Every structure is written in structure tokens, then in C-alpha cells.
Image (spheres, helix red, strand yellow):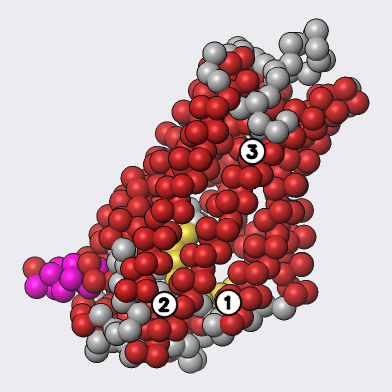
């Protein structure tokens, strides 16, 4: 049997690694605080650099507090018997298996979310506010939270009930995996068009204001042999002054979205360069590739459910007592096992973060190359620098920290690669 202290050792090692990496980045920021790194002296000034430094250190310290709290919550649920207590209480008092499962999920993840709430609040109303990025009101914060809870309940609870029904069939885990794939594809099709508008307003790029830009966008799409995708502007300024742009959707819901905050801060050439970068993601089928790898990972997850279902040492390893169906409980172990796996998942996925980051950075390089080919390197570089300054992102990072976490290449690497691809065209 795997003793529980191995589980404690595992989560403590992961948490220490998270804290170690964050501290490396904090140290790096302190070391570079007094002067702008020479490489970027033309792109930013000392005041901006020091503002970014303070902002990023504040966020990193908050992350550390969050890692420690999350681990404490996990220890409470597992080794201190919190989950066991809730599970015993619910399974003894609720006859209906679906109702029992839903209550178990609601209790465990409800408690975790409530504990996470002060962190979300401090991030938005203390840190973002202090550095001038917050545009959110408390009212919007509350209504966002309520909408998110309702939306997850409406989408996920029927899925959970269906999964519990299917798991009991022969090869049930494979059916559930199939359903999960279908659900994700459906979400990618309907989320951008029907669900994202619950939170934000999306409008077409203003035809009068951006008349020339729209003509140039049409030319860009034609020369890259693309059918024109919807280009929308999102009212990101409702919540924050951070700017961004992204590409999303599948089939007819494919779209490129600009935050209004970004559009206001960059010129037409830069907008076109960023748009070309987003188009690069489309040209290289990055959404599809990401989707396929996530299906591979979810296959492993559902197969693990199949394998671990009656492997009782796993439950004990995480400090829970499995139901002996028909003897200690009228309910199956699926709900309990799912909760245990979802609780430990962030710790397991942490180990694979560098691989996911590496693959994402590879995609960013590809999209940049596409943008350079179809627009030009100077515009893309200056747009990126403007994004870095507006978002108070660090121009310089601890190497290991960046390699581990960064989904986008660090500024220096990225600009070097952009210049290199400009030479090679
Ligand atoms: Zn990108």
C-alpha cells in the first residue's frame, strides 16, 4: 500500500518548486530594478521599468500565498479527513446517486472557490487597482462570479450526471471520453458566439473609423489565401486596461478578437501586424493541434479513472476511505474518485507545465514568422513592445522561470527571432 506520507511528500515537493521558481523571478527582478536592461533601453524608460518590476513582484508574492493556501486546502480535504467527512455525511443522507454526486462536487469545489475568492478580490482591487489597471466595480465582480457559477452548473452538472451513468457500462470510460471530446468541440463552436457575450460586448470593427485598415485587412486575408474571418472588438476596458488580441472558435464561429484597450494604444500598421500574428495561428492550425493534444491527455485521465476505480490503495494514499459498494455505501466510488483526481490534477499537471509552455512558445514563433512574412518586422516588434509597456510585462526574466511557465517567448528571444525571420524572407 502507498502510505499517505508519500502523498504529503509529493504535494510538498511540488509546492516548494512553485515557491522556488517564483522566488527566482522575484530575485531576478530585484537585481535588475535599478536600471533598464541595456537591450531595451530604447523601448522603455526607468519609471516604466520600475513600475513593471513592482507590479510583477506584487503578483508573484500573491501567487506564493495562493500556492500555500491551495496546498493547505488539499491537505485539509485529504489527509485531515475533510473530504471523507463530507462524503460520509452525504452518502448516508442522500439516496439518489446523482444528487449525492452533485452535492459532493458542490461542497468540495464550492469550499475551494470560496477560499479562492479573497485572492481574486485582492488581485483585482488591490494589485491591479494600485497599478492603475483595474476598471472593474465590485458590482461587476459579483455579477461575473454569479454568472460563472450558473454557467458552470448549467454546462457541467448534466455532463457529470451523464458521465456517472456511462462509467458503469462496460468500456464506459471510453464513452465518457467520447462525450468529453464532443462537449469540447461543441464549446469551441458555441462559446465565442453565444456564451462569451454573457460577459462582454463584441462589435464588428467600426467601418468608418477603420475604413483603410479594413481594406488592408481584406488584402492581407486574400494574399494569405484566407476567407475573411469575423474581426471583432471586445469591451475589455470594462474590467481592465490591459490590452490583448486572440484568435478563437471553430468552423463558423472562427474569429479574431481585439480588446478595445489594445486598439486604442497602437497604430494601424501595428494593428495589422498583430492581426497577421493571429492569422498565423489560424494558418498553422494551432487551435486544432492544441485540441488534439488535450484529447490525448483526457484519454489518459479517463483511463486512469478506469484503472483506479477499484484500486483501493489510491484512495487511502490520498487519505480517503473508498465505499465498499453495498456494504458501507449504496453509492459507487466514481464521484469520490473524480473529486480526488480533480484535487490532485493541478499538482500532476504542474510537472508537465514546461512541455506545454515549450509547445505554446513554438506556436508563437510560428505565428510571428507568418506575421513578418505578411506584414513587417518593425511593426510587429513595436506593437509587441507597446503591449509589454501597457501591460507592465517584464522585459527581462529569470531563465528557468520563463522556460517553465511562459506560454509566450520572453521579449528578447521573440524580437531576435522576428528580426531573424525578417532577414530570411
Ligand atoms: Zn500568439
* Residue 159 can be seen, yes or no: no
Q: Residue shown at 75%/75% (left/top)?
A: 138
Q: List x then y, in percent, for residue 309.
A: 61, 17
Q: Residue shown at 58%/51% (left/top)?
A: 68
Q: Is residue 151 inside the magenta stretch?
A: no
Q: Which mark is drawn over residue 53? A: 2
Question: Which residue is the site of mark 3?
Answer: 75
Left or right of residue 158: residue 195: left
Q: Residue shown at 88%/22% (left/top)?
A: 92
Cα gap from disc 1 to disc 2, whole angstroms = 14 Å
Callout 3: 10 Å neighbours few (<14), some, many (20+)?
some
Q: List x then y, in percent, for residue 170.
A: 60, 12
Front tag of 1 and 2: 2
| Secondary structure beneath label 2 | helix
Q: Nearer the viewer, residue 16 or 85?
A: 16
Q: Is residue 418 inside the magenta stretch?
A: yes
When asked about the image quadrant of residue 87, the answer is: top right
Q: In the rendered image of this protein, does residue 355 appear above or below residue 224?
A: above
Q: Nearer the viewer, residue 298 or 91?
A: 91
Callout 1: 10 Å neighbours few (<14), some, many (20+)?
many
Question: Which residue is the site of mark 1?
Answer: 128
| Disc 3 and disc 1 in contact, CB within 8 angstroms | no
Cα gap from disc 3 to disc 2, whole angstroms = 33 Å
Q: List x then y, in percent, for residue 15.
A: 49, 46
Highlighted range, magenta: 414-423
Q: Which mark is drawn over residue 407? A: none
| Secondary structure beneath label 3 | helix
Query: Which is nearer the N-term, disc 3 or disc 1?
Result: 3
Q: Residue shown at 8%/68% (left/top)?
A: 424
Amino acid at each position: 500500500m502507498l502510505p499517505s506520507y508519500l502523498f504529503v511528500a509529493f504535494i510538498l515537493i511540488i509546492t516548494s518548486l512553485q515557491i522556488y521558481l517564483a522566488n527566482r523571478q522575484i530575485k531576478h527582478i530585484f537585481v535588475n530594478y535599478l536600471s533598464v536592461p541595456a537591450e531595451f533601453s530604447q523601448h522603455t524608460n526607468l519609471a516604466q521599468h520600475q513600475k513593471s518590476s513592482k507590479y510583477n513582484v506584487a503578483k508573484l508574492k500573491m501567487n506564493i500565498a495562493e500556492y500555500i493556501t491551495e496546498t493547505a486546502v488539499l491537505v485539509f480535504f485529504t489527509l485531515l479527513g475533510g473530504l471523507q467527512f463530507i462524503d460520509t455525511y452525504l452518502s448516508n443522507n442522500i439516496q439518489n446517486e446523482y444528487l449525492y454526486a452533485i452535492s459532493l462536487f458542490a461542497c468540495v469545489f464550492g469550499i475551494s472557490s470560496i477560499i479562492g475568492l479573497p485572492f481574486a478580490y485582492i488581485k483585482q482591487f488591490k494589485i491591479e487597482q494600485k497599478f492603475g489597471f483595474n476598471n472593474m466595480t465590485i458590482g461587476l465582480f459579483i455579477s461575473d462570479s454569479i454568472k460563472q457559477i450558473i454557467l458552470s452548473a448549467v454546462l457541467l452538472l448534466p455532463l457529470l450526471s451523464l458521465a456517472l451513468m456511462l462509467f458503469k457500462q462496460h468500456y464506459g470510460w471510453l464513452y465518457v471520453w467520447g462525450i468529453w471530446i464532443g462537449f469540447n468541440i461543441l464549446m469551441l463552436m458555441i462559446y465565442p458566439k453565444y456564451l462569451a457575450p454573457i460577459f462582454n460586448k463584441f462589435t464588428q470593427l467600426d467601418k468608418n473609423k477603420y475604413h483603410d485598415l479594413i481594406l488592408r485587412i481584406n488584402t492581407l486575408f486574400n494574399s494569405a489565401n484566407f476567407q475573411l474571418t469575423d474581426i471583432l472588438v471586445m469591451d475589455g476596458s470594462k474590467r481592465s486596461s490591459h490590452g490583448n488580441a486572440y484568435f478563437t472558435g471553430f468552423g463558423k464561429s472562427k474569429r479574431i478578437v481585439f480588446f478595445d484597450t489594445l486598439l486604442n494604444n497602437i497604430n494601424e500598421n501595428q494593428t495589422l501586424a498583430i492581426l497577421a500574428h493571429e492569422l498565423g495561428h489560424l494558418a498553422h492550425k494551432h487551435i486544432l493541434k492544441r485540441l488534439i493534444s488535450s484529447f490525448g491527455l483526457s484519454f489518459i485521465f479517463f483511463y486512469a479513472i478506469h484503472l483506479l476505480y477499484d484500486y483501493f490503495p489510491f484512495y487511502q494514499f490520498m487519505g480517503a476511505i473508498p465505499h465498499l459498494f453495498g456494504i458501507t455505501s449504496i453509492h459507487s466510488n466514481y464521484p469520490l474518485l473524480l473529486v480526488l483526481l480533480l484535487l490532485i490534477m493541478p499538482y500532476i499537471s504542474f510537472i508537465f507545465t514546461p512541455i506545454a509552455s515549450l509547445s505554446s512558445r513554438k506556436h508563437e514563433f510560428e505565428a510571428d514568422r507568418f506575421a513578418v512574412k505578411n506584414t513587417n518586422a518593425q511593426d510587429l516588434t513595436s506593437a509587441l513592445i507597446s503591449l509589454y509597456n501597457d501591460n507592465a510585462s517584464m522585459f527581462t526574466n529569470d531563465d528557468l522561470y520563463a522556460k517553465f511557465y511562459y506560454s509566450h517567448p520572453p521579449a528578447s528571444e521573440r524580437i531576435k527571432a522576428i528580426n531573424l525571420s525578417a532577414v530570411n524572407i
